[in-house]
Image (cartoon, helix red, strand yellow):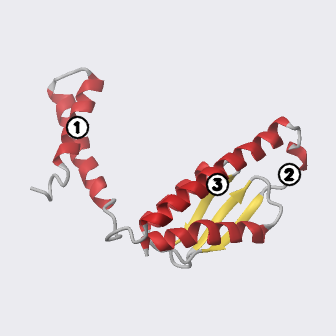
Amino acid sequence: MTRVLPFPLISLCLLAMWLWLSQSLALGPILLGSLFAVLGGWLLRMLQPDAKAVRNPVAIVRLAGLVLVDVIRSNIAVAAIILGGQRHNITSGFVDIPLDLRSRQGLAILACIITSTPGTLWVNYNLDSGILQLHVLDLVDETEWIDRIKNRYERLLLEIFE
């Protein structure tokens, strides 16, 4: 049963939401919704964590605090660039950062952190080499960005997941 429906409650909720949004209990929407519900359960099964347990819960709190401070600081910096009329004086660019982090959950959290911080964007990650390509809106010093990602975020994520 778990092979067909690995998450039966989630599949049922997906079917119910599909039928509610289609506002029909006809055979077509039921069959299509059932297909999406089964596929949704299979896709969620692929997201099962590879980490057995979080190793350092204190690091989670420290990481959340760092991210909060960095997001606020980046919002202010990007607002200053946009509202201050400095858009012509900035140099955006790409930074390649070698990562030691290999945990899928750790990489996903790092991607969320980087993308939610204004002025930065996760562009590419090479699984074989572990190189993260990052786009920075106002790139002044490439080594500062490498240091920030490696020592502020990756170090804590390694404490948490590996």
Which mark is on residue 13? 1
Image height of 89 relative to 143, above or below:
above
> Amino acid type of disc 1?
Cys
> Amino acid type of disc 2?
Ile
Looking at the image, the residue that sits furthest to the left is 1
Q: Quadrant of residue 85?
A: top right
C-alpha gap between disc 1 and disc 3: 33 Å
The residue under label 2 is 90
Provide residue 59's location: percent of width, then percent of height.
Answer: 50, 66
The residue under label 3 is 121
Q: Earlier in the sequence, mark 1 or mark 2?
A: 1
Q: In which quarter of the image is the N terminus?
A: bottom left
Dot 1 lies on which element? helix
Marks 2,3: beta carbons within 8 A: no
Provide residue 147's location: percent of width, then percent of height.
Answer: 70, 71
Provide residue 27's location: percent of width, then percent of height.
Answer: 14, 28
